[in-house]
Structure formats: structure tokens, C-alpha cells
Image: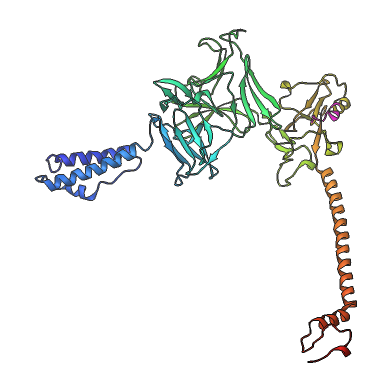
Amino acid sequence: MVHGQPFPKQEIIIYSLHVFFHNTLIFPLPLPSLLISQVKMEKKPVNSATRSLATQLLFLISSILYTCTSATAQELLAGFKANPSSSVSSFQSLLNDSTSTFSLGFLRVNQTQLALTVIHLPSLQPLWQANPTSSFRWSDKTQLFFNGSLVISDPHKRSFWSTGTSQQGDKVVLLNSSNLQILQKQVVLWQSFDFPTSTLVENQNFTSNMSLVSSNGLYSMRLGDDFMALYARFKDGKTQQMYWKHKALEAKAEVVQGQGPIHARLESDGFLGMYQMGKTPVDIQPFNSFHRPIDRFLMVQLEPDGNLKGYYWAQTDWVLDYQAITETCELPSPCGPYGLCRAGSGCSCLDNRTQVDTASFQCIDGDDQSRDFCSGSDDFWVLRRKGVELPFKELMDSDTTSSSVEECELSCQRNCSCWGAVYNNATGFCYPLNYPIQTLVGVGDESKVGYFKVRTKRSWHKKMKVGIRVLGAVIVVLTGVVLGYGGYKIWNRRRRGPKRVLEEKTEVSPGPYKNLGSASFKSIEMF
């Protein structure tokens, strides 16, 4: 109402659009001054010019509204194409769910690379990633397109990654659960929930043929016959050492042999459950928020340190709700290679000789951990340490044939794939380490003794020094030969210098001589 009178029809439409903009978009759009002045004026007769102006403004605002609301689609159809934009600094959204909580798009990685990810929009937390083992180049030439399959290609049309749905899908949708799906007439051909990366979200099934892999690629989670476990990859992808295991307690249902594999699911009630048949779990791992009536979105993530952690979204940040490993020293390598972890004391090095940074506890970084010790005994030196044990020795194979610490050490010394061993004098157990040495746990019991091989480049340095000496000797000899030959040439030229100069003058001297080839000056005749 303006001064007790209703707005003209055009003003009502325009003002309604302004209110819509103000309430819908993140930023308020100011009402144009022309329209404000028109609204403040009392009702006037509407002529054709006013109607034309209002129509043009309405069309302009409608166009802006369409652009803003349709910038991110809610489905991708066959023929869709998208390239990374140079103006985007972090995340470029391509497809949203209906609630705008989740989005599929390009995520910048190290400024020059991109990852195709599904993220939680309020926190920009990645929940799924295409081809997590590698990233693609952030370039306007890199392209994501949908031709029945989702495909990422480079400028030469080389396919980096594809969903492999054989060009049968007719659309791509993102569900309110964060599940990305390719559909053909509402039939699911492919979905991201079947290919988890490092994260599971609530109500997502995790089966025995899946694995969670940490973002650094070092740790993974897999299911066994009646358990779930965490594994570490310590050497060139060949060694998979189990460092955490949770067996089904079977409190409400039993695992029946021959009735199929178990699967896991993160339940919205606040627990990670394992199932085999039906809806009754064979095991429950409760979160801190278990059965608490809070509005939350749950996820579990395999962290870069190897721990499995659960979180819920508390409207402004993620709250830690669960962790599989509660003690830092029980993690696979909290202090790095050749580190020592003591409860309540933090990290140090097994030995000062393994410390590479005197300002910190950083120990040998283990750059050269892909080779074994078969190349020769001078490739390593031996480090012994009392009062140490392995953080996950219960999950390792032990050698009970060793009757003494000397036999335990000798068995490792003879084995070129053995990096070390830990011996327990009380039990007589010898634990050989067939992977590069990681963090050991410091204990007060000195009957637990460690024997460790430390890779050294000492032999390489010796060979290099010998090579340098030989090369230096060769250079000296060659230099002497060159200088000697050069000196001889100079001496010889000086010795023959006058005669050669005379001969040269005789051959090229100008003058009115008739015969330049006579044997003496007496025979030279002049014209």
C-alpha cells in the first residue's frame, strides 16, 4: 500500500521480484532507484510508455533470476559438457541435489590440478572423488562430458576417467544423500556409493569387495569374513600389514558360514553396524551421539594418519563423534620412520644417529624403501634398542623358533627382505619386520629388544669417491698430455720460426720479379 492505495499491477510484480531476490539469494539486490521513486509516488494513470518500461525491466529481472537460479543444474542430460573456469579459485559447482546440501563439481588441487568431487556444500568437505589415485590438469581444455557415461578427457580427447556405463544412461542426478547416480529411465546404471574413496556417509553400504583408502594412499579399510580391519602399505605397495581389527561381537545375530559375506553401514542413529542377513546387525560400533535426538549428518573417514574417525555436522563445523584408535602410539606410524612414541611424552627418534633434523624429532625419512638388503651387507648399519615393542604385535606373525635374542637377530640378518625384528625375552617371541621400519612404542620393560637395519649410502659414497678419484686421475693425465703436446708444438714452431718466415716471404712477397722460384737471390732477374 502507498498512502492507503494499492500498488499498480506493474509495481506489484517488480516489487515481488525484488523481495524474492532479497530472501532467496545470499546477497540482497537493491531495488533500482527508478522503481523506488515509482513506488513512493501515488498511483498515476498507466500509459503505454510506462507499460513498456515496466515490461522491459520485468524481462531483464526475469533473465537475471533465471541465470542465478539455473547456474547449477539438478540433472545432467546427454550432451552435457563443462570445462574448468580460470576465474574459479576453489570449487566450481556443476550439479546440486534438490536441497543444495551436496554438489558435484571441479575442485582445485594445488592450483594447477583438479579433482571431480561430490562435496558437502556448507563445509566444502569432499565426500567422493573420481579416480582418487590421480588428479587432472586444471585447464579450459580439460573437459567433463556426459554421453551416457560421465567422462573426463584432455585436449587430445584422451579419456582419463569414465563411469563406463557404455553410453546407455540418459541423465545424471545427485541425491539428497550425496549419492551420484546415472539413470536410464529411472533404472540405476551406476552410482558413486558403489565406489567409495576415503569416506562413508550415513545409510551408505560398504561391502566386502569395496575398500576405503586414505587420501595419501597409505592406509585402507576392508571387510573380512566376520571382521573389519585397517591395513598399512609400507613398501612399494607390496606389503599390506593389518594394524587394527574389529571382530563382530554377534550380540544380536550370528555370522553364519556359507550365508554370504558381511557388509557394513553407517546408520543415522549414530553407529557403524555390520550385517550379514536381514536388518539385525551382527555388530554395532556406537558413536558418542548414539541414540541422541540431534539433527545431524554423519560420515566416517579414513584419515591420512591411518585412523578411522566418525563425525557429524553441527551446522557450523564437524564434530568428532568416533575414532577406532584412541591412543596416538597405537597408530601405524605417528612419529614416522625410525620414530619412537611414548604415551604422554610424544615423539622422538630411536637413536640420535637416525635424526635428520636436530630442531625436531624428525628421523630418517626413508626415501629409499623400495629395495631390500640383498645387494650387500654394507648397505646398512645395525641399530639396537631396549624397551621397545610394536604397536600392533598381536596382529603380526611371530617366529617362535628363536630361542634367544641372538637367534632372532641372526634370522633377520640372513633374510635380505627383513628390515628388523623385535624380541620379547619373557615370551621368546620374535617378530620379524618385512617392511621398512616405522614408529616403535617405548615401554619400561627392557626385556623387549629391537634389532633394526638402517639404510645407509655409505657404500655408495665410497664408490662415488673411488669414481671421483679415478676420474680426477684421468683428467690430470689428459690435461698433462694436452699441455705437453701444446708445449711441444709451440717449442717446435719457435725453433723453425725464421726459416718458415723466410720461406713464406719468399713465396708471397710482392714485386716485379720474373722468376720467383730460383734457388738464390743471384738468379733473380728484374724486368
The picture quadrant where one finds residue 62 is top left
Q: How many marks?
A: 0
Give the image location of residue 290, x and y in percent: 51, 20
Residue at image location 70% in from the left, 28% down from the top: 238
Q: Residue furthest left?
A: 45
Please tell me whether residue 258 belongs to the stretch shown in magenta: no
Q: Left or right: where does residue 418 sit relative to residue 307? A: right
Which of the 4 image quadrants contains residue 422? top right
- Residue nearest the observer in this picture, 351 or 432: 432
Horizontal side of 121 relative to 161 (left or right) equals: left
Residue 88 horizontal/vertical position (percent)? 45, 44
Q: Nearer the viewer, residue 121 or 456?
A: 456
* Picture colour scheme: rainbow
Residue 104 in view here: no
The range drawn in magenta is: 411-418
Q: Position of residue 60 (x, y in %)?
A: 25, 44
Instruction: Check the image and report above or below for 317 versus 186.
Output: below
Please report the residue visible at 31 percent of the width from the left and 43 percent of the height from the top. 28
Image height of 524 relative to 120, above or below: below
Residue 91 visible in image: yes
517 or 242: nearer the eye? 517
**In terms of depth relative to the viewer, which is nearer, 515 or 422?**
515
